[in-house]
Image: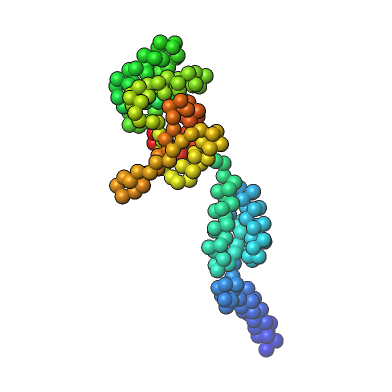
Amino acid sequence: MRKLFFLIIPLLIMISSWFIFDLSRYLPPDLIFSRGIKYESAEVQKQLTNKLKEENIPFRINDEGFIEYRKKDEDRVKKMADQIHIALSPAPKVEQPPPNTSFSNPETHKLFVTLLQKEGIPYRIDSLDDKGNKYVIWDLSDDEKVLNLIAQVKQKASGNDIPPSISFYTKEHTEYFINLLKKADIPHKVVKQTKQQSIKIYIEYEWEDYVRVKKLIRKTIAEANTDPKT
């Protein structure tokens, strides 16, 4: 009997231990840390844990470094983690192309190149896109002189009847550019045209302001990250 008692006691202890350590299966799912997330960046991990504390979201860090949290908080945690990861990720390097222009009309292109040669301004002709379009490229140090030549060529090609203009893809970029024109006190006119059931906004200006406006266009492209249609 005594021997049987000593056999039963360890068995009861094992059963009790199993029951105690497996209580998680009897707990409501919302109380269990059943989800985990881990980033290689220690800074991302640190900021995420700080954010979880700020938002009063329960969590724990396991032996492998995973931040464990409840299933009910999964959407909130992943959203916070993604925001932190994106904010800490280095911005992609955008390589600015050298100053350049292109002309669809061969005669206009020829006139421009002739003026560059006449002024002794170094240039090269190359393709800057995958469409095979040829661009005339020059050094930034000659930029102002070249822009003046472009203004002459374009004005002559338009016959002085059509003012220079520019159109941007989005309302935000258009407003950004107009604000730059206002700050620079450059006269301009906003023209709305209906094309294919949509309204296209063009900003017209004077030929005499071409060089100044061109620089503001580049500023808009660089700071607003867009490509205009001129």
Q: Where is residue 100 in the image (x, y as percent from the top left)?
A: 43, 25
* Picture quarter with the C terminus: top left
On screen, residue 159 versus residue 217, left or right, reads left
- Name which quarter of the figure residue 73 lies in: bottom right
Q: Position of residue 191 (x, y in %)?
A: 39, 41
- Using the image, determine if residue 201 lies above or below residue 114: below
Along the line of sight, which residue is nearer the eye, 76 or 139?
139
On screen, residue 129 versus residue 59, left or right, reads left
Q: Position of residue 112 (x, y in %)?
A: 37, 18
Residue at 55% x, 33% y is 184
Along the line of sight, which residue is nearer the eye, 204 or 7?
204
Residue at 44% x, 12% y is 119
Residue at 54% x, 53% y is 82
Number of numbered tags placed on the structure image:
0
- Using the image, determine if residue 33 lies above or below residue 38: below
Along the line of sight, which residue is nearer the eye, 17 or 226?
226
On screen, residue 5 versus residue 215, left or right, reads right
Q: Which residue ends up furthest to the bottom in the rendered image?
A: 1
Residue at 33% x, 31% y is 131
